[in-house]
């Protein structure tokens, strides 16, 4: 990433961050407006359904204490409330009668247990709720039966946030004596419906609830609640969420979120800012989703922070730890900046879904997809390894046989329990001797491999081993191949040494011949008695011999440079047929002198190759010069240019005037001639130069001889 792109991204991020902070500040500025709306709509929590239901359950659970006081003994709720009436049935079948009786008894017990468990649990929870003050009095005796260490008084009722006095007369009719901040009618309806919900008949049995009679219930909730009972938590939950539930503030959050998303998308679409192209484009989807859930949870939790700020609790908490309450607005702006900032990052990250497409996004940004793909590769690799096992291989086949037999034997021994222990002992002994035999055989094979490698290390290349070495058989095969390679390398080295010796001999002969002639004729020229005609003849001979010596030296330098790779090659598009005809024209006079007619043939009208024109001319000059020196006179020579899918092949074919009774591959070596007598005018470097120049241009050069038929073949692959 270049510095300019990085700077643009930083600049765009700063702009987006500033916008996020400004929007967060505007969100905080709406608090006062929405609190006014909330205060105008707020309802007492004690008029809600949950508190009415809570009082109803308390009334019926506490009345059990009154019934026990009147009866003078401990009673269960079913003894107090449940009234069961059985219808009489007449039947002559005793078995049916017993069956029905059992079913009815089971049903009655189930109803009793359900009612007892429910009201007992309610009674226990009532005594744990210290914010609900209660007092229950028996109207017949005027005594207080149970209470929460509290006595109701008309003088102190204004100290409570909510209170009510319920009076049940002798017939169970309900009346309200005192009530404040409670939905009395709904409470009376709920108390009556509680009775009717158990009134039903089933299988000839009728169930009903006995009403509460001659009892007065006093309830009150103080203005200052003590933590942490049911009343406290319901009140806290309602107060903490009232800012979200009773105002339009959630729509402000939604609007701010949409605004930040739009701004983030707009800034990322501008090439000037380059937003969303950095690390945000690589965030995995799982992290984005988790961040979104946590961000939403954080936004919901802000309701409690806003409520505590409104009530002054947050200011008290900050002051208690030594922090100024003036920082509260900044804390809120910071919190909303984080929430909206996360929204911006999520937006930039999810934009990659549109940029990359669904498949590419899932491939690059979804961790689950990466894990599945990784597992798939591992499973595929494991399957491939399993399928690569050669079952027909001797080692694998024997291993499978042993494992199969071992599995069958162990399965049988495990199936006969106690006797299998004796069988396992015998099986272990047998396996010991079997494995001992195999290990000894393996050791012998290993020792033999070491002997072979030791012999090869000492230069003994004729060591053979006919015995199958089992697990080490592939190593023996490789050692045999290495042994053959060593032999071939030694033979090639001997051949190279012989060729070097012959090269020195040939170079000495070919350079010495013209040099000797030059020295001889120079000495002759020193004689003052020779005639002018003889002097001219000697000078002409000296000129020819010196030119020949010069040509030999130049050819030697050229082939040396070509073999060393120091020759520069300038490739260009060359029309091969035109190049061949041009060289033919240049050597036409020499070809006519020996009576050789050149026939150029091709399966294409024009053949284009990427070659070095100058060096390609030299290739054909040497090949056609070879025709002049070594081809049978007064015969045709052929040049075939064949183009196919594999490449282009050029063949120069002629009949040799000397029998080719030697290895033609040696003709491409330096100072090797077609005539062993070395009486021709050739330097022995022509074909060596041809081979080097062809290979420099990426081609192949080959000589083929069949009797007197001589073929020089050049191949260039298609590129």
Image: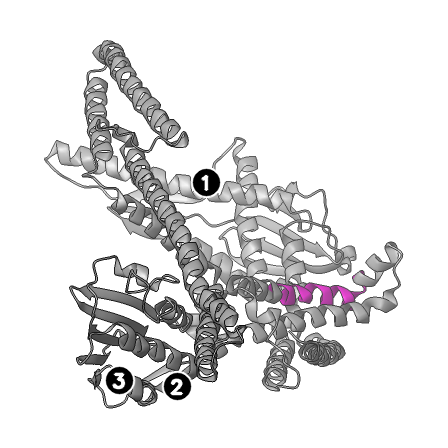
**In the image as oriented, which residue stretches furthest toward the front?**
529
Q: Earlier in the sequence, mark 2 or mark 1?
A: 1
Residue appearing at x 27%, y 39% in the figure: 104
> How many numbered marks, from 0 up?
3
Q: Could you classify mark 1 by the number of other residues whose Cα lies within 10 Å: few (under 14), some (14-19), or many (20 or more)?
A: some
Residue appearing at x 35%, y 37% in the figure: 109
Cα gap from disc 2 to disc 1, whole angstroms? 105 Å
Quadrant occupied by the C terminus: bottom left
Image coords of residue 272 (percent x, y) = 66, 86
In magenta, the rendered stretch is 297-313
Image coords of residue 697 (percent x, y) = 40, 74
Cα gap from disc 2 to disc 3, whole angstroms? 33 Å
Is the magenta region chiefly helix, strand or loop?
helix
Q: What element carries label 2?
A: strand
Label pair 2/3, CB-CB below 8 angstroms: no
Residue 593 got which mark? 3
């Amino acid at each position: 990433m270049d510095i300019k792109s990085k700077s643009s991204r930083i600049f765009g991020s700063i702009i987006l961050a500033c916008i996020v902070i400004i929007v967060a500040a505007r969100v905080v500025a709406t608090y006062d407006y929405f609190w006014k709306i909330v205060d105008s709509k707020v309802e007492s929590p004690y008029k809600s359904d949950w508190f009415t239901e809570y009082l109803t359950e308390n009334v019926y659970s506490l009345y059990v204490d009154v019934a026990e006081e009147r009866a003078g003994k401990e009673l269960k709720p079913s003894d107090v409330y449940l009234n069961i009436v059985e219808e009489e049935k007449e039947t002559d079948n005793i078995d049916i009668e017993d069956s029905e009786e059992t079913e009815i008894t089971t049903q009655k017990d189930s109803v009793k247990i359900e009612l007892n468990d429910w009201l007992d649990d309610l009674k226990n929870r009532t005594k744990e709720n210290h914010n609900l003050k209660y007092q229950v009095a028996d109207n017949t005796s005027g005594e207080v039966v149970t209470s929460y260490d509290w006595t109701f008084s008309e003088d102190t009722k204004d100290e409570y946030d909510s209170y009510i006095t319920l009076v049940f007369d002798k017939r169970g009719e309900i009346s309200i004596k005192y009530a404040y901040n409670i939905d009395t009618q709904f409470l009376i309806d709920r108390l009556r419906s509680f009775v009717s919900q158990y009134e039903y008949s089933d299988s000839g049995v009728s169930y009903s609830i006995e009403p509460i009679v001659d009892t007065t219930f006093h309830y009150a909730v103080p203005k200052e609640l003590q933590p942490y009972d049911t009343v406290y938590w319901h009140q806290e939950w309602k107060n903490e969420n009232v800012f979200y539930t009773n105002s339009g503030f959630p729509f402000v959050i939604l609007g701010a979120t949409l605004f930040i998303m739009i701004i983030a998308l707009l800034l990322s679409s501008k090439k000037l800012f380059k937003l969303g192209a950095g690390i945000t484009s690589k965030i995995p989807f799982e992290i984005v989703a988790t961040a979104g859930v946590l961000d939403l949870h954080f936004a919901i939790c802000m309701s409690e922070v806003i409520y505590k700020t409104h009530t002054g609790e947050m200011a008290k908490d900050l002051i208690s730890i030594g922090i100024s309450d003036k920082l509260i607005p900044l804390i809120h702006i910071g919190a909303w900046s984080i929430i909206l900032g996360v929204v911006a990052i999520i937006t930039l990250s999810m934009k990659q879904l549109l940029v990359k497409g669904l498949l590419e996004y899932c491939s690059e940004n979804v961790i689950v997809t990466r894990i599945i793909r990784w597992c798939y590769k591992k499973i595929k690799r494991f399957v491939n390894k399993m399928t690569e096992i050669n079952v027909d291989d001797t080692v694998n086949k024997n291993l499978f046989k042993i494992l199969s037999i071992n599995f069958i034997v162990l399965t049988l021994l495990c199936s006969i329990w106690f006797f299998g222990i004796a069988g396992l002992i015998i099986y272990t002994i047998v396996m010991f001797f079997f494995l001992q035999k195999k290990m000894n055989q393996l050791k012998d094979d290993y020792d033999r491999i070491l002997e072979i490698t030791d012999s090869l290390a000492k230069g003994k290349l004729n060591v053979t081993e006919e015995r199958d070495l089992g697990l080490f058989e592939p190593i023996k095969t490789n050692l045999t191949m290495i042994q053959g390679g060593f032999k071939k390398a030694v033979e090639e080295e001997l051949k190279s040494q012989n060729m070097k010796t012959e090269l020195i001999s040939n170079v000495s002969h070919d350079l010495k011949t013209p040099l000797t002639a030059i020295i001889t004729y120079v000495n002759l020229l020193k004689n003052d008695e020779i005639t002018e005609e003889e002097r001219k003849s000697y000078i002409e001979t000296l000129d020819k011999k010196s030119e020949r010596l010069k040509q030999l030296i130049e050819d030697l330098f050229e082939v040396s440079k070509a073999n060393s790779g120091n020759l520069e090659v300038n490739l260009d598009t060359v029309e091969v047929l035109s190049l061949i005809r041009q060289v033919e024209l240049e050597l036409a006079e020499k070809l006519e002198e020996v009576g050789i007619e050149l026939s150029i043939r091709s399966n294409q009208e024009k053949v284009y190759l990427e070659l070095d024109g100058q060096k390609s001319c030299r290739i054909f000059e040497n090949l056609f010069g070879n025709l002049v020196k070594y081809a049978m006179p007064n015969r045709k020579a052929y040049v075939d240019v064949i183009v196919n899918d594999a490449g282009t092949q050029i063949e120069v074919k002629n009949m040799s005037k000397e029998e080719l009774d030697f290895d033609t591959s040696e003709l491409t070596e330096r100072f090797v001639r077609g005539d062993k007598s070395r009486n021709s005018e050739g330097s022995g470097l022509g074909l060596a130069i041809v081979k080097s120049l062809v290979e420099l241009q990426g081609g192949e050069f080959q000589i083929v001889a069949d009797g007197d038929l001589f073929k020089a073949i050049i191949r260039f692959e298609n590129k």
